[in-house]
Image (cartoon, rainbow, N blue to C red):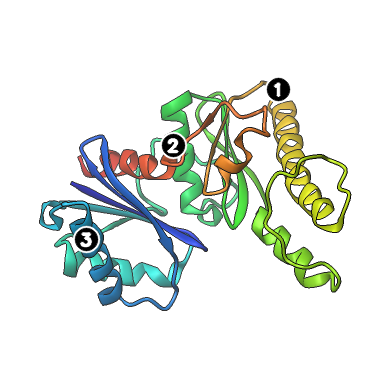
Amino acid sequence: MLLAVDVGNTHTVVGVFDGERLQADWRIATRREVTDAEFGVLLRALFQERDLDSGHVDGMIVSSVVPNLSDMLTAVGRNYFGCDPLHVGPGIKTGMTIRYENPHEVGADRIVNSVAAVARLGAPVIVVDFGTATTFDVVGPAGEYLGGLIAPGLGVSAEALFDKAARLHRIDVRRPQRIIGRNTEESMQSGLFHGYAALVEGLVHRIRAELGVDAPVIATGGLAPGLEAELSILDLVDLGLTLDGLRLIWEKNCR
């Protein structure tokens, strides 16, 4: 079995593969102060909950945007699963040429998502990942990673509005009944929800214009399902995209 771990700023996604089949996956909060003992015990408990034998894990791959957790995850692999994790970063095989000016600056999850997107939809392709930040990653017609965009995530945008506007209270960000709000709460919901949908659609249209081709769009990330019905530009929503990309990269390096 392969253990795949994607560490984001807000959530960590863990998946267990038996060959190409995803047997189980979990989304847990990212804690920067967590120890290898705490995380190792948590993972073993999650395995037991799904009747999975952690002793059958013979490979582990990690992508992380939180650098100070890398050593902790290496210790978890060695001490709890008996294997040294493969960390996604410079020097590993992805099968994709990176055209970023400084490839070391590209978040590991962005490359992982792009590899998985090409496997699903071919190239060119655009990946939109709705996380703490919303990232747009672009793979050109030749299958090369060209770059992308980074925008504040919907949750970050909402928190900034609540923090900076003294008379606006916190609300649940969801689709309101109408565009034109008739009270403060509706007005905020409409501005946040529809405004964010318009941002995503507008940026995708501009990316396509610069590419010169109507590249398909695949979305992932925890907020993707809530926006799916509102975004006509989406061809596919795949919450397991990053985990599948990790599996593909592991196979390129370890088989």
Question: Considering only order in the chain, which callout, 2 or 1, is on the residue closer to the N terminus?
Answer: 2
Q: Residue 28 occupies which quadrant of the picture?
A: bottom left
Between residues 108 and 158, which one lies in front from this camera angle? 158
Q: Amino acid at mark 2?
A: Val
Image coords of residue 90 (percent x, y) = 42, 53
Q: Are marks 3 and 1 in contact (CB under 8 Å)?
A: no
Q: Amino acid at mark 3?
A: Asp
Label 2 residue SS: helix
**Disc 3: CA contacts within 10 A as few (<14), some (14-19) or many (>=20):** some
Q: Answer with left or right where residue 73 lies relative to residue 212.
A: left
Q: Answer with left or right where residue 38 lies relative to residue 63.
A: left
Question: Considering only order in the chain, which callout, 3 or 2, is on the residue closer to the N terminus?
Answer: 3
> Which part of the image, by quadrant, shows the C terminus?
top left
Residue 192 appears in the rendering: yes
Q: Residue 147 occupies which quadrant of the picture?
A: top right
Residue that label 3 marks? 84
Image coords of residue 206 (percent x, y) = 75, 33
Residue 229, which numbered label?
A: none
Q: Answer with left or right where residue 20 lies relative to residue 190.
A: left
Judge whether 215 appears above or below 24 on screen.
above
Label 1 residue SS: loop
Q: Are marks 1 and 2 in contact (CB under 8 Å)?
A: no
Image coords of residue 241 (percent x, y) = 43, 39
CA gap, disc 3 and disc 1? 43 Å
Q: Answer with left or right where residue 148 lies relative to residue 239.
A: right
- Residue at image coords 45%, 74%: 32
Residue that label 2 marks? 115
Residue that label 1 marks? 212
